[in-house]
Image: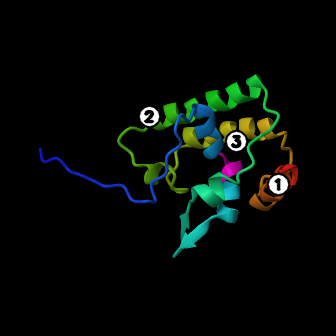
Amino acid sequence: MKQRRAIASNLCLIIPNATLYHFGTLSSTMHNAWMRSVCGRLKSDYRYSAGIVYNNFPWPEKLTEEQQQAVTDKAQKVLDVRKGHAGQTLAWMYNPETMPDDLKKAHAELDAAVDAAYGYAGKADDAARVAFLFKLYGKLVAKK
């Protein structure tokens, strides 16, 4: 078998020492609403950046161990469900027309855990979530 070599570009981002909690939060509707709001675009594709999207994302401040564990557990469940669809691509798994029901349910449970970590009880739409996050962001900026 021929070995392939690849060189990652400056568009490849990593989070050293990331945990399942980080994966869960970054995979949540909360973070994705933030990303869709502040992210740049090239054509119609999102351009995630560490400087604008990640570094300015207001993570939950008063997170209890139980809340963090709940996000961690639900993040693991998402990965376990995805593993149950081995052989399928992420594009297939996350296509609204083909997304398996068990994966939808796992993400809904993850979103509920992340919302609880934030103490968020607002509407499920992006606009309400982004307004909530910008209030948190404003408090963080005011502290500095």
Judge whether 93 appears above or below 35 on screen. above
Tell me which label, 3 or 2, sits earlier in the chain.
2
Q: Is residue 42 magenta?
A: no
**Callout 1 environment at 10 Å: few (<14), some (14 to 19), or many (20+)?**
few
Judge whether 59 appears above or below 92 on screen. above
Majority secondary structure in the magenta region: helix
Q: CA distance from mark 2 to mark 1?
A: 40 Å
* Residue 5 percent coordinates (x, y): 23, 51
* Residue 63 percent coordinates (x, y): 78, 32
Question: Which residue matches tag 2?
Answer: 83
Q: Secondary structure at mark 2?
A: helix
- The three-letter code of the residue at mark 2 reads Lys
Left or right? Give the position of 103 relative to 111: left
Which one is in front, 124 or 140? 140
Q: In what quadrant of the picture does the N terminus appear?
A: top left
Question: Which residue matches tag 3?
Answer: 111
* Residue 75 percent coordinates (x, y): 60, 34
**Callout 2 environment at 10 Å: few (<14), some (14 to 19), or many (20+)?**
few
Q: CA distance from mark 1 to mark 3?
A: 26 Å
Q: Which residues are magenta?
A: 27-31
Outermost residue, left direction? 1
Judge whether 38 appears above or below 67 on screen. below
Q: Quadrant of residue 119?
A: top right
- The three-letter code of the residue at mark 1 reads Val
Residue at the image position 81 percent from the left and 57 percent from the top = 134
Question: Which residue matches tag 1?
Answer: 141
- The three-letter code of the residue at mark 3 reads Asp
Which one is in front, 139 or 101? 139
Q: Secondary structure at mark 1?
A: helix
Q: Please say if the residues under marks 2 and 1 sit with CB atoms less than 8 Å apart.
A: no
